[in-house]
Image (cartoon, helix red, strand yellow):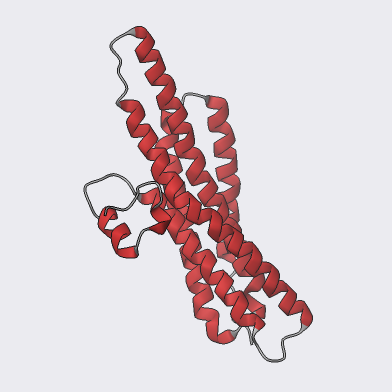
């Protein structure tokens, strides 16, 4: 039985990769960006839980680890949802372009549908980018209080979340030129600028391995 296109997160890894490597345009980079972020978030959860098992950990550090794990799990769930939502958003764009345009009324309706679809196709990767950047902040918060033996897992989480953010940014950049609503475009560009600044600030500070 073929996997349901509306439930990408329930696919096996094999099914996902097979579809990803096919001639179909979906799932594509946006879904991969969300998946990358979800994997990073899950690793942050793991790092937190392993850290809470350390012998002699004090109450303050344990509280930080627990809080971070809960927050990362929330982002993991959100990014998992966005894997599917990104594919559905681009599918909506493709369907809008297939609408008839034989009359003025049909042409107007088609253009409106295309614009609505592109709005969503920008909003979804913007959510992905935001969630990935937030997860990177969690990486910075939890690094020094975790288990040193799991530090490599946290570094992988960092790389995955950064890749997710940059992948989402590429999807925003490729879709936003199609949007005619300049007020919407300006709001998106302002949010993207803030997120890019956060990424740049994070990259300046190398996370340290706990003792």
Residue 143 versus residue 127 in the image, above or below: below
At a point 52% along the width and 71% down the height, the residue shown is: 43
Quadrant of the drawing holding the N terminus? bottom left
State the image quarter where residue 94 is shown.
top left
**Observer-nearest residue: 198 or 64?**
64
* Furthest-top residue in this view: 104
* Quadrant assignment, res 11: bottom left
Q: Is residue 98 left or right of residue 55?
A: left
Asked if residue 208 shows in the view, the reply is no
View extreme (right): residue: 59
Can you give x and y, in whole percent of width and height, for residue 180 in the image?
47, 24
Name the outermost residue toward the bottom: 55
The residue sitting at 32% across, 22% down in the picture is: 99
Q: Is residue 31 above or below residue 109?
A: below
Q: Is residue 1 left or right of residue 48?
A: left
Q: Residue at x 49, y 61 (%)?
A: 38
């Amino acid at each position: 039985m073929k996997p349901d296109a509306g439930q990408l997160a329930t696919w096996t890894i094999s099914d996902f990769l097979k579809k990803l490597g096919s001639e179909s345009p979906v799932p594509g980079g946006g879904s991969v960006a969300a998946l990358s972020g979800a994997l990073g978030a899950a690793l942050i959860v793991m790092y937190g839980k392993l850290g809470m098992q350390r012998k002699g950990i004090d109450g303050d550090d344990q509280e930080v680890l627990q809080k971070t794990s809960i927050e990362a799990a929330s982002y993991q769930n959100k990014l998992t949802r966005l894997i599917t939502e990104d594919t559905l958003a681009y599918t909506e764009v493709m369907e809008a372009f297939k609408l008839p345009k034989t009359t003025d009324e049909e042409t107007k309706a088609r253009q409106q549908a295309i614009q609505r679809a592109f709005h969503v196709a920008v909003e979804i990767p913007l959510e992905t980018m935001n969630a990935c950047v937030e997860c990177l902040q969690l990486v910075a918060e939890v690094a020094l209080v975790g288990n040193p033996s799991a530090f490599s897992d946290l570094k992988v989480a960092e790389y995955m979340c950064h890749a997710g953010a940059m992948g989402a940014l590429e999807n925003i950049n490729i879709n936003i030129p199609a949007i005619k609503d300049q007020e919407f475009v300006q709001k998106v560009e302002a949010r993207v600028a803030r997120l890019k600044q956060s990424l740049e600030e994070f990259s300046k500070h190398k996370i340290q391995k706990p003792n």
